[in-house]
Amino acid sequence: MNETLETIWKRRSIRKYKPEPIPEEDLHLILEAARRAPTGSNKQNWKMVVVTDPEMRRKTAEACSGQMWMADAAVILCLVTLPGEGKTNGAIVLDHAILAATSLGYGTCWIGAYDDAKVKAVLEIPDDHGLVCLTPVGVPAEAPAARPRKPRAVLFAENGFDKAMDYELAIG
Ligand SMILES: Cc1cc2nc3c(=O)[nH]c(=O)nc-3n(C[C@H](O)[C@H](O)[C@H](O)COP(=O)(O)O)c2cc1C
């Protein structure tokens, strides 16, 4: 298996972090991976708020349904879309950042449970902008097993929606 597939395979939602910093060069690689993500018509209609300040991290975690474990991670990323834009591009951007972080050994977790107004207030995001999701990025303090996925034949169909597709993986 190549490194890209290994990264996808090993990503987990991490909900426990060591309160350790991330070297700046690693953070910059993660942000650059996001910057290189594709967007429709190359509009790049997004902005990412990079939350490094501990008190701001705490307030952000509070605004995310009180998921306070987020604040232990060195950084919280918040993906924002520009006014009137959909969230698809933003999700692709955040996924690029998450996979880059995974490849560098950091933990992440998609955070979709948040109070829109509270996150915007904490991070000074204008009301007419949209929130996609957030993620902590930090040194993991847990190594959970892979979470289950639906059977392949439920998720895939070949040449027609009702024609279940199944396959075996050589690598498991
Ligand atoms: C859009 C989205 C929103 C999510 N929001 C949260 C969240 O607010 N809190 C949380 O702990 N996990 C959240 N998750 C993580 C999912 O629970 C997790 O991805 C799923 O259980 C599968 O586990 P895995 O990521 O380890 O494979 C979210 C995931 C996605 C994709």
Image (cartoon, grey):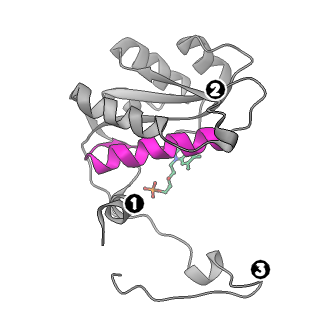
The residue singled out by tag 2 in the image is: 115
Type of amino acid at the residue the image marks with label 1: Ile
Query: Horizontally, is 53 left or right of 25 in the view?
Result: right
Query: Horizontally, is 95 left or right of 85 in the view?
Result: left
| SS state under label 2 | loop
Q: Quadrant of residue 92?
A: top right
Mark closer to the chain start, 3 or 2: 2
Is residue 164 on the magenta stretch? no
As displayed, is residue 52 above or below residue 139? above
Residue 14 in the image: x percent, y percent? 36, 46
Residue 131 in the image: x percent, y percent? 64, 29
| SS state under label 1 | helix
Q: Quadrant of residue 158?
A: bottom right
Tell me if residue 73 can be seen.
Answer: no
Mark closer to the chain start, 2 or 1: 1
What secondary structure do most residues of the magenta stretch adopt? helix
Q: Quadrant of the C terminus?
A: bottom left
What is the spatial separation of the Cα atoms under label 2 and label 1, in whole angstroms? 29 Å
At 79% from the left and 27% from the top, the residue drawn is 84
As displayed, is residue 19 above or below residue 58? below
Q: Quadrant of the N terminus?
A: bottom left
Query: Horizontally, is 59 left or right of 124 in the view?
Result: left
- Which residues are the magenta region? 88-110
At 57% from the left and 88% from the top, the residue drawn is 166
Mark closer to the chain start, 1 or 3: 1
Could you say which is closer to the camera, residue 38 or residue 73? 38
Q: Which mark is residue 8?
A: 1
Type of amino acid at the residue the image marks with label 3: Phe
The residue singled out by tag 3 in the image is: 161
Tally of numbered tags? 3
What is the spatial separation of the Cα atoms under label 3 and label 2, in whole angstroms? 36 Å
Name of the residue lying farthest toward the front: 41
